Image (cartoon, grey):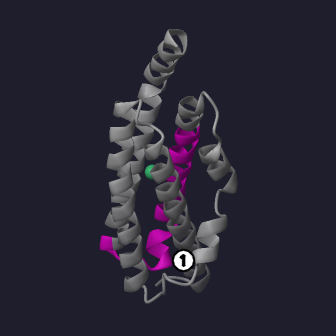
Amino acid sequence: MASDATRQLFLTGLRNAHAMEHQARELMERQIERSTDYPQVEARLRQHLEETKTQIERLNTIFDELGESHSEFKDAAMAFLGNMAAIGHAVAPDEILKNQLANNAFENYEIAAYKSLLALAQDGGASASAVNTLKQNLAEEEAMAKWVSEHVGEVTLDYARRTHAS
Ligand SMILES: [Fe+2]
């Protein structure tokens, strides 16, 4: 049986994850618009944007299953990770590089958030299918973090070539 305290912690974690994914979606939408010179980055961001929309739906399914509303915490979504959003907003010549570094941090933050949720899930009252759902989200974050980490060098050199060419 789930303890009430653990359930509350789990619900708070879920709400934070929901806010985090909203922030991720907004960041990626902005970055996609500004990554057209880097088609490989743009394509991977588009893929992860679609994954992120699905992740939000998955989180909503868990809220429904727990009998909790997911429409009452828009403010938290707006305020969450403001610093990251500022990085995403910054217009600088090397914006593409700054975004790769920020995305590396953001994806690893997301990984830790899902690991934390998974640690609480069972005692927090999550069903087996909810646990699997969280694992699906985690796997997508891990894949994206790996991609960002593996491509940061390549994107940097691409940027360097463009800077020298102009
Ligand atoms: Fe992500």
In the orientation shown, which residue stands out farthest toward the front?
166
Q: In percent of the image, x 53 and y 10: which residue is there? A: 164
> Is most of the magenta stretch helix, strand or loop?
helix
Say which quarter of the image contains residue 82.
Answer: bottom right
Q: Nearer the viewer, residue 165 or 161?
A: 165
> Could you tell whether 105 is left or right of 59 in the image?
right
Q: In percent of the image, x 41 and y 30: which residue is there? A: 37
Magenta range: 102-129
- Relative to residue 7, is residue 43 depicted above or below? above
Residue type at mark 1?
Answer: Leu
x and y percentages locating residue 97 in the rendered image: 56, 29
x and y percentages locating residue 29 in the rendered image: 45, 52
Q: In percent of the image, x 54 and y 59: which residue is there? A: 23
Q: In percent of the image, x 53 and y 38: which residue is there? A: 104
Say which quarter of the image contains residue 150.
Answer: top left
Say which quarter of the image contains residue 143.
Answer: top left
Q: Nearer the viewer, residue 68 or 117?
A: 68
Dot 1: few (<14), some (14–19), or many (≥20) neighbours within 10 Å?
A: many
- Relative to residue 101, is residue 130 depicted above or below? below
x and y percentages locating residue 60 in the rendered image: 40, 76
x and y percentages locating residue 157 in the rendered image: 48, 16
In the orientation shown, which residue stands out farthest toward the top?
164
Residue 153 seen in this snapshot: yes
Q: Is residue 106 magenta?
A: yes
In the orientation shown, which residue stands out farthest toward the bottom?
67
- Relative to residue 45, is residue 135 depicted above or below? below
Residue 119 seen in this snapshot: no
Tag count: 1
State the residue position of label 1: 11
Identify the element where label 1 is drawn.
Answer: helix
